[in-house]
Amino acid sequence: MKRAYLAIIFLVIASLACVFTSNVTQEPVSLPTTVPAGTLPPTQVKTPRPTSEEPTKTPYPTSQLDASLENEINLIQTQVVEERGLQPKYPVPVVLLSPAELRQNVVNDYEMDYSDDEAADDVLELSTIGLLEPGFDLRTLMVNLLSEQIAGYYDNETKEMFVVQGQGFEGPERFTYSHEYTHVLQDQNYDIQNGLDYNDDACEADTERCAGIQALLEGDATLSQTIWYQYYATDQDKQQIESFYSTFKSPVYDNAPAFLKDDFGFPYDQGAAFVQEVFTNGGWSAVDAVYKDPPISTEQILHPNHYPADKPIPVDLPDLTTVPGEGWREVSRNQMGEWYTYLILARGANTAARLDDSTAKDATAGWGGDEYVLLHNDATGETAFVMKTVWDTNKDAAQFASAFSTYANTRFGVPAATQGDTTTWSYSGGYTSLYHLGDTTLWITAPDSTTAQSLTTAVFP
């Protein structure tokens, strides 16, 4: 699944409206002057390599800034450096584009990185696990969503800052710039693509790890932005920002599928909560230490007390492509993680089947590790999905199995049939089973019971 963040461009879109209302209106963040000893355990991996040389290639010529704008940008950069504590390695090129040019630039990048075939495979996967309706036009939605609200962004591939021109550089733009300049400092100190291994190829291979890293990056930038607002924004800035967000409208975002809106907000909301927890215990030095051993799962972000010791339990599924017969291909193989397992139960396309937030969170909080495989037969149009999850305890597995059964009864529109350790649902066009034994569950969706049984036997011979 090519999650939304795999565009590898840091954007400020509608999700930041939630950041504004949930963060900057709280009590001011206190700025500790020292870091208490022992607030974080020793790091276990090599420190990310900082980028030490200025990039030699950029697709856009650096814009000539007028003196007033240049002074404002330099002031914000100085303020962010002062409060964040990371030092820039070289000046970041600033490119001024009109709102239309900025939108088109983002759309071009996205369309170049995301093919029609990739989008079709993602819709196949997301509809199989119940988050989208079959045939949903995901690619068009993403293009429209990325085009809707862009206040500016930092591109960590070209090492450029893009700023919208022609509509002033007022409170909202300054607020955005403080967020995006934090990304510049992260990149120049920790090398996002190579030092953190946060790039298209690595993220396609392990979406859970990249979700954890993105939550760190965006949570860091969101906290930095919040502190900038509280301590550096002028009264005029604050009035303009509050006025902007009080009338903020984003119809594309507002009407997007429920899971996608929550997933877009995850790095900003849950990521900010994770970073805030680290910051509260040790200030920016403690946050910097996290970059030496970044979170590797959404579980660690959702439960900061699980970081860094509680690492995902390795789960390996065998090659299943030949099990259903001839003509099948493996569409995807990855980790679902605690966050997406929660979204399946609470934010599915079938609104009647959604569990309440508390039930879904409790049912997935004991996630230990998983792997899933999606198979498809292009000739017949048949699909099979296999997901094996190991839970922290037998009780956690039983709690998920119970919640999943409640969800599935409504989603598939038929009552469950239980035989031994397996619960099944047989419905028009498909068959789903949930096998539960001890601390393990196995979810299989297949064209029929015979295929499902063959896949179960392949996983548990």
Image: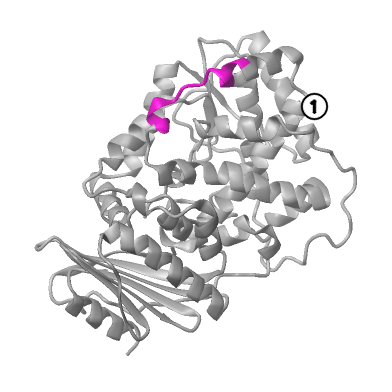
| Residue 250 magenta | yes
Give the residue number, with chain letter if any, for mark 1: 231
Residue 111: quarter of image: top left
Residue 311: quarter of image: bottom right
The tally of labels here is 1
Judged by its main secondary structure, the magenta piece is helix
**Magenta segment boundaries in residue numbering:** 243-254
Residue 294 on image: x %, y %: 63, 58
Question: Is residue 217 shown to the viewer in this render?
Answer: no
| Quadrant where the image shows the C terminus | bottom left
Residue 446 on image: x %, y %: 22, 69
| Quadrant where the image shows the N terminus | bottom left
Figure check: 49 above or below 77: below
Left or right of 162? Residue 66 is right
Secondary structure of residue under mark 1: helix
Name the residue furthest bottom.
461
Residue 110 on image: x %, y %: 37, 38
Name the residue furthest left.
379
Residue at x 52% of width, y 24% of height: 151
Left or right of 14? Residue 146 is left
Residue 392 on image: x %, y %: 57, 75
Figure check: 414 above or below 130: below
Residue placed most toward the observer, 104 or 333: 333
Residue at x 27% of width, y 77% of height: 320
Figure check: 84 above or below 123: above
Residue placed most toward the observer, 234 or 133: 133
Residue placed most toward the observer, 110 or 256: 256
Left or right of 317? Residue 43 is right
Left or right of 319? Residue 180 is right
Q: Amino acid at mark 1?
A: Tyr
